[in-house]
Image (cartoon, rainbow, N blue to C red):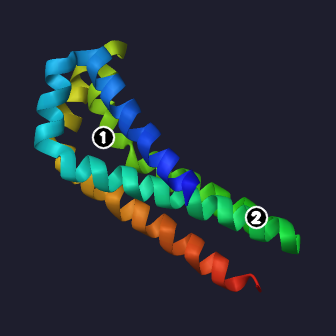
């Protein structure tokens, strides 16, 4: 549980820092005011996945089922990465990819929803794997 709370807090701080550094504090506060329900949902989902991942690793070590850890870890990592795809809108201008940024910006809400669905899929998969390992 502590791992999840730390992961959530770190992701929220990273969100604020990246937005502030790339586009300024004013932009960050505007984005936060507009999108905070999505950002908080994604950060909490990330935190839950981090907590589940740690728990799954502990259980796997207890039962020496390395294959479960490898598959679950990969799935979790992919789900966590996909939940953060909306940050591309803020990072890509530094890379000079303005055309991509305009395209991604048009679908920002859809990317938030994709991230939420990916979070749920990652959590569901890890919960499924946790239930398969005997207590």
Front one among 81 and 51: 51
In this rendering, the answer to whether 50 lies above or below 10 is below
Lateral position of residue 3 relative to residue 39, left or right: right
Quadrant of the rendered image containing residue 97: top left
Front one among 27 and 101: 27
- The numbered dot on residue 58 is 2
Q: Residues within 10 Å of mark 2 (few under 14, many from 20)?
A: few
Number of labelled discs?
2
| Rendered location of residue 88, percent (x, y) | 33, 32
The residue lying at 41 percent from left, 58 percent from top is 45
| Rendered location of residue 129, percent (x, y) | 65, 76
Which mark is in front, 2 or 1?
2
Regarding residue 19, the answer to whether it shows in the image is yes
**SS at mark 2 in the image:** helix
The residue lying at 64 percent from left, 55 percent from top is 74
In this rendering, the answer to whether 15 lies above or below 56 is above
Lateral position of residue 50 relative to residue 10, left or right: right
Regarding residue 111, the answer to whether it shows in the image is no
Give the residue pinned by disc 1: 86
Callouts 2 and 1 close, C-beta under 8 Å: no
Q: Residue pushed farthest right?
A: 64
**SS at mark 1 in the image:** helix
Lateral position of residue 88 relative to residue 123, left or right: left
The residue lying at 23 percent from left, 19 percent from top is 98
Q: Which image quadrant: the N terminus?
A: bottom right
Lateral position of residue 129 relative to residue 40, left or right: right
| Rendered location of residue 118, percent (x, y) | 41, 61
The residue lying at 47 percent from left, 54 percent from top is 47
């Amino acid at each position: 549980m502590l791992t999840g709370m730390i992961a959530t807090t770190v992701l929220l701080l990273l969100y604020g820092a990246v937005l502030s550094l790339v586009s300024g504090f004013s932009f960050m506060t505007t984005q936060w005011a507009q999108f905070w329900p999505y950002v908080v949902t994604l950060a909490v989902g990330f935190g839950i996945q981090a907590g589940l991942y740690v728990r799954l690793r502990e259980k796997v070590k207890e039962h020496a089922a390395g294959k479960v850890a490898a598959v679950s870890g990969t799935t979790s990592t992919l789900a966590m990465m996909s939940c953060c795809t909306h940050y591309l809108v803020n990072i890509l201008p530094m890379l000079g990819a303005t055309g991509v940024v305009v395209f991604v910006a048009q679908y920002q809400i859809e990317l938030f929803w994709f991230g939420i669905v990916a979070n749920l899929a990652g959590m569901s998969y890890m919960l499924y794997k946790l239930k398969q390992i005997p207590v």
